[in-house]
Amino acid sequence: MTERDLSTLLREHLSDEPPTSLSPADAIRTGRRQTHRVRLLAAGAGALAVASVATLGGTGVLGGGSDPDPVAKEAPVAQAAPDTLADVMEAVAADGFRPHVGALGEPRWSVNDVLGQPVKPGDPAAQNFLLDFRPAGTPQVNLTVGGFAQADRENYPFEGACAAGLDRGTLVECTETTLADGSLLTVSVGPISQVGGDAPRLLTTDEVEGRDPGTFAWSRVVAVDSIGNVSTRASEYVRGDDVETADWKVPVAALRAVALDPTLLAADVAHEPMPLYTGE
């Protein structure tokens, strides 16, 4: 993948100052195989039901025969509608981010299909969901949830991104952990440019040495690629001259808790295979 390819991929989903929600590990993973994997992005404040949190309500006794002394019956209690994916993501983000960054501000939502095209809330093709907040004390915090097909495990390697990113200098820190159930958890830190004079793209540590900290950001992303074919990303983007002075607000443990939230990993999203693009 060329830098131009990567810049185009990032530019599609950036419209303001804050950096992208693309995990450096995601970009490096695709780059080392010369493949282009559509990012997991998010969906409009829409109503997609999450199977894991849908509650079936109702009580009663089947069969009891006729009532010998009929009485006026109370109106049935209306059952609350199941939480949508948007509801669940906003609640998880609030619990995970707000204690560390304060008021989150208005949520920014977008929804995409597997090709990265916007779709309407509730569309069965909705596969990738992005919830974006711009708190006052930090440039951006993101939560993404998306689905992928089982075949994508072979087409797009889910391991090895850390080593490739560290070798290329686009990651400063990175760890990969295989969880007990076989899911992959990645924690990565790296520099990324913002929208401005240059196209938004992943940067190397050499490129940011001595650079004006107002022209780039440091990304810290906790990513989970689950055995159930759902990916989550909990991300924070902050300023700093270097990674040691980056003004992190959200602890890694909090990002990890968000990314591992069981209701997110059980999200009802599409699982269409991602198209495989081979670089020239």
Image: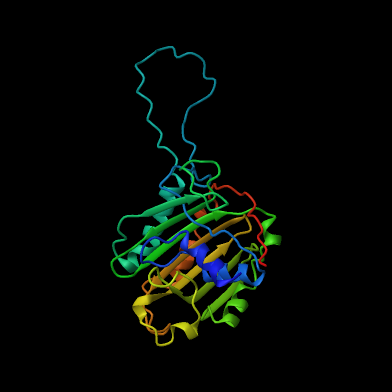
The answer to whether residue 178 shows anywhere in this view is: no
Direction bottom: furthest residue: 210
160 vs 29, nearest the viewer = 29
125 vs 257, nearest the viewer = 125
Residue plotted at (46% across, 72% down): 220
66 vs 135, nearest the viewer = 135
Which quarter of the picture shows residue 107?
A: bottom left
* In the displayed structure image, the side of residue 183 where residue 108 appears, left or right: left
Residue plotted at (60% across, 82% down): 167
The quadrant in which the C terminus is found is bottom right
Q: Position of residue 184 (x, y in %)?
A: 61, 66
The quadrant in which the N terminus is found is bottom right
243 vs 114, nearest the viewer = 114
Q: Position of residue 148 (x, y in %)?
A: 61, 54
Q: Position of residue 62 (x, y in %)?
A: 53, 23
Q: Position of residue 81 (x, y in %)?
A: 42, 37
Residue plotted at (40% across, 75% down): 216
The answer to whether residue 273 shows anywhere in this view is: yes
Q: Vertical placement of 265 versus 164: above or below?
A: above
Q: Vertical placement of 114 versus 31: above or below?
A: above
